């Protein structure tokens, strides 16, 4: 596995891990994903305020995630050729504008545009942040990728908790208070950008590994990438159903309060953080393929049981499901980066983009399905999604 984002001048290669830069990128990922997690966390509030149905909620998720999905691979392709040290701070600027729009929205259209701008910020952030993390990793590429992923997942977990503590009691306009978080991330990423600029990365002019004649994927690599995409599809579809509609499921089936549902969503998301951390650690020791298989087979019994148990067991099972399914994501991404080592930006953009995009499509479809049937039926159907992973794996 290479330690650089692309074939570059020797001075861009780090002999030792730049821990301050790794820590800064992990924290910036935490702040970025914390802000983005506020959108699904406020769904119960805006659903009532604007009299939205589940289909419209799903379209908001689509606006956010599909924007990120479409643009991330293109951002990665551009930065593979011409790295942009300060693009991360610029992406945070888009997130800031989107957040302010959400806080002051007076119509569904403003909510939709705000969600799209937050998605644009995500599209700009992830590909180049992965490149910077790899450059700073030195010999500890696997460790750095795992920590970078954990930073984002921790932010996604804390977002709903802060929403329950601040946004639910104070209302939609309290989102503006989180603009300080975004400004702090912009300052931090400006410092990282100066480090990256001083490093002097050069564009790649060499052929990336895994590419055949004419720059096309070699057949074996193409098949492996396709399988990884299919794995990502089933995982993102299931986790999307939990992230977007878990609070509604708990409120509808168990009659919990909005605040309690947000706290239980936080429990599920923090289980994903632990799963990614454990998966990254074990992947270096027992192999990435083993972790992927454990993630596929291990979650299936729990997802099948989930629609039929009481509240206590729902909490227990979602913790297990979140941890097991998240354990494979670092392994899948590092595996993909090894298949295409000279195209870090494009690969990171594709896989983060696929996660967002497929999650968006499934969220929108599941929202309409919930309107036609019920939230409980959606969870019964989604319980079989890990069998798709089993068939494709």
Image (cartoon, rainbow, N blue to C red):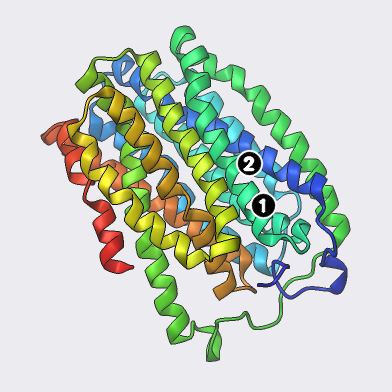
Helix, strand or loop under label 1: helix
Which residue is most to the left?
A: 373
Badge 2 or badge 1: first in the primary sequence: 2
**Percent position (x, y) of residue 195?**
85, 51
Helix, strand or loop under label 2: helix
Please indicate whether residue 370 sits to the left or right of residue 66 in the image. left
**Percent position (x, y) of residue 318?**
35, 35
**Percent position (x, y) of residue 376?**
17, 32
**Percent position (x, y) of residue 187?**
77, 35
- The answer to whether mark 2 and mark 1 are in CB contact below 8 A is yes
Q: Residue at x 78, y 73 (%)?
A: 8
Q: Crowdedness of circle 1 by 10 Å Cα count: few (<14), some, many (20+)? A: many
For residue 252, above or below residue 205: above
Residue in front for this viewpoint, 159 or 170: 159
The image quadrant where one finds the C terminus is bottom left
Q: Crowdedness of circle 2 by 10 Å Cα count: few (<14), some, many (20+)? A: many
Residue in front for this viewpoint, 172 or 15: 15
Res 258 visible: yes
Identify the mark at residue 129; answer none if there is no mark.
1
How many numbered circles are shown? 2
Q: Residue at x 24, y 30 (%)?
A: 54
Q: Residue at x 22, y 25 (%)?
A: 310
Res 125 visible: no
Identify the mark at residue 29; answer none if there is no mark.
2
């Amino acid at each position: 596995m290479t330690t650089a984002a692309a074939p570059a001048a020797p001075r861009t290669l780090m002999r030792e891990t730049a821990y301050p830069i790794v820590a800064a990128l992990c924290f910036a990922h935490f702040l970025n994903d914390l802000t983005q997690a506020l959108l699904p966390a406020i769904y119960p509030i805006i659903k009532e305020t604007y009299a939205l149905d589940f289909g419209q909620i799903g379209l908001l998720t689509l606006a956010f995630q599909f924007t990120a999905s479409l643009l991330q691979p293109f951002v990665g392709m551009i930065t593979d050729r011409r790295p942009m040290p300060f693009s991360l701070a610029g992406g945070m600027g888009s997130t800031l504008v989107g957040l302010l729009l959400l806080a002051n929205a007076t119509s569904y259209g403003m909510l939709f545009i705000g969600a799209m701008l937050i998605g644009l910020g995500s599209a700009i952030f992830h590909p180049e942040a992965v490149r910077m993390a790899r450059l700073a990793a030195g010999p500890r590429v696997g460790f750095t990728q795992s920590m970078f992923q954990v930073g984002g997942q921790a932010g996604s977990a804390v977002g709903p908790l802060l929403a329950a503590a601040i946004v639910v009691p104070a209302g939609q306009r309290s989102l503006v208070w989180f603009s300080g978080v975004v400004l702090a991330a912009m300052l931090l990423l400006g410092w990282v950008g100066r480090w990256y600029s001083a490093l002097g990365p050069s564009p790649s002019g060499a052929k990336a590994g895994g590419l055949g004649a004419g720059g096309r994927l070699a057949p074996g690599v193409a098949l492996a990438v396709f399988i990884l995409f299919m794995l990502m599809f089933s995982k993102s579809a299931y986790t999307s159903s939990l992230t977007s509609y878990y609070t509604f499921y708990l409120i509808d089936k168990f009659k919990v309060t909005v605040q309690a549902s947000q706290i239980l969503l936080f429990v599920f998301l923090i289980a994903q953080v632990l799963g990614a951390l454990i998966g990254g650690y074990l992947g270096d020791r027992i192999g990435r393929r083993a972790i992927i298989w454990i993630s596929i087979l291990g979650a299936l019994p729990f997802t099948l049981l989930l629609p039929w148990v009481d509240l206590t067991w729902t909490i227990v099972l979602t913790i297990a499901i979140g941890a097991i399914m998240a354990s494979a994501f670092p392994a899948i991404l590092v595996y993909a980066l090894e298949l295409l080592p000279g195209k870090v930006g494009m690969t990171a953009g594709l896989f983060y983009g696929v996660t967002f995009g497929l999650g968006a499509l499934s969220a929108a479809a599941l929202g309409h399905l919930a309107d036609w049937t019920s939230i409980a039926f959606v969870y019964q159907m989604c319980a079989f999604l890990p069998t798709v992973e089993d068939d494709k794996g």
